[in-house]
């Protein structure tokens, strides 16, 4: 059985419109579908763990890509110049977004960076002129004892895009994305932290300091949500 799609396997196959990748495949090689302008959708099976550099470079007709959570590595330029791509869900297991991964994806409007991502490479979102919203994780810094946003200084995110920050936690439930004034959690001085930045919670939950600590989220509209019994 086929276990990988080799480098440049379908390079420049402009007449290719559909592709079914078998469940035996664990990797998609570099430039595997480079310039396959006829491809419109791509579903990657949950057997795949890595997507090589420039794998879908220049697939200008690609509108939808389904990437399973089994994927932990997406290499640089994987979706460069995929003009028609509207949104992308980066799998939870990915820890780095390499350089130029989404460069030139002018149709991309929304991106959610998963909580596990700790680095974003140079030009990762360069020339993504249609990007309107990007959800960015904040991570706890033990040295400063504060939450810090993911460094996106070299990612070239358009100035017109709205950056919404979030802290992922283990409590259940969904919160509608809103702009909020502050988040406070913890009932003791050593565990109480207030955040005064924009944070979102669409399917994410602000994490509490401990099992019996509630979380209060204060919306600009003065609505208050309290999530109790959550754990880090």
Image (cartoon, rainbow, N blue to C red):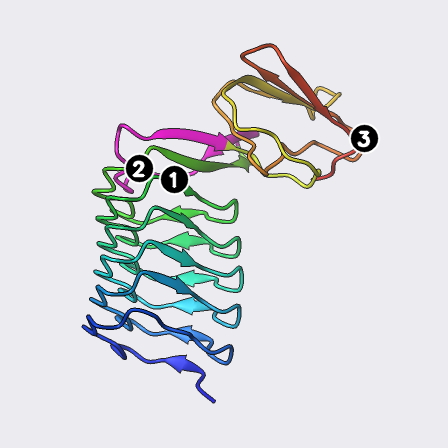
| Residue 178 sits inside the magenta stretch | no
Q: Quadrant of residue 219?
A: top right
Q: CA distance from mark 1 to mark 2?
A: 6 Å
At x 49%, y 69%, the residue is 45
Note whether residue 120 is visible: yes
Q: Earlier in the sequence, mark 1 or mark 2?
A: 1
Q: Earlier in the sequence, mark 1 or mark 3?
A: 1
Q: Nearer the viewer, residue 139 or 161?
A: 161
| Residue 155 sits inside the magenta stretch | yes
In the shown orientation, is residue 147 left or right of residue 155? right
Q: Is the residue marked by circle 2 packed among few (<14), some (14-19), or many (20+) residues within 10 Å?
A: many
The x, y position of residue 103, in whole percent, is: 24, 50
Q: Which mark is residue 212?
A: 3
With respect to residue 70, does 183 lie above or below? above
At x 26%, y 64%, the residue is 54
Q: Which mark is residue 110?
A: 1
Q: Which mark is residue 167?
A: none
Q: Nearer the viewer, residue 9 or 159?
A: 9
Circle 1: element type = strand
Q: Which mark is residue 131?
A: 2
Query: In the image, which residues are magenta?
Result: 144-165
Q: Quadrant of residue 57?
A: bottom left
Note whether residue 142 is visible: no
Q: Is the residue marked by circle 3 packed among few (<14), some (14-19), or many (20+) residues within 10 Å?
A: few
Q: Earlier in the sequence, mark 2 or mark 3?
A: 2
The x, y position of residue 202, in whole percent, is: 55, 35
The x, y position of residue 107, in whole percent, is: 27, 44
Circle 3: element type = loop
Q: CA distance from mark 1 to mark 3?
A: 35 Å
């Amino acid at each position: 059985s086929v276990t990988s799609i080799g480098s440049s396997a379908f390079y420049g196959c402009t007449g290719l419109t559909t592709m079914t990748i078998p469940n035996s495949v664990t990797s998609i090689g570099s430039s595997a579908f480079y310039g396959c302008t006829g491809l419109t959708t791509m579903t990657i099976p949950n057997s795949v763990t890595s997507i090589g550099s420039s794998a879908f470079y220049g697939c200008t007709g690609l509108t939808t890509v389904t990437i399973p959570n089994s994927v932990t590595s997406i290499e640089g330029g994987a979706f460069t110049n995929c003009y028609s791509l509207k949104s992308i869900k980066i799998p939870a297991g990915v820890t780095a977004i390499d350089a130029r991964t989404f460069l030139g994806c002018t149709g991309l409007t929304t991106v959610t960076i998963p909580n596990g991502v700790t680095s974003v490479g140079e030009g990762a979102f360069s020339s993504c002129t249609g990007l309107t919203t990007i959800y960015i994780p904040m991570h706890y810094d033990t040295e400063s004892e504060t939450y810090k946003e993911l460094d996106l200084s070299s990612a070239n995110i358009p100035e017109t895009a709205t950056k919404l920050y979030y802290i992922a936690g283990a409590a259940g439930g969904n919160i509608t994305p809103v702009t909020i004034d502050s988040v406070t959690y913890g009932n003791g001085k050593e565990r109480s932290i207030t955040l005064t930045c924009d944070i979102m919670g669409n399917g994410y939950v602000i994490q509490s300091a401990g099992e019996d600590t509630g979380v209060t989220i204060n919306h600009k509209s003065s609505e208050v949500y309290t999530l109790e019994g959550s754990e880090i």
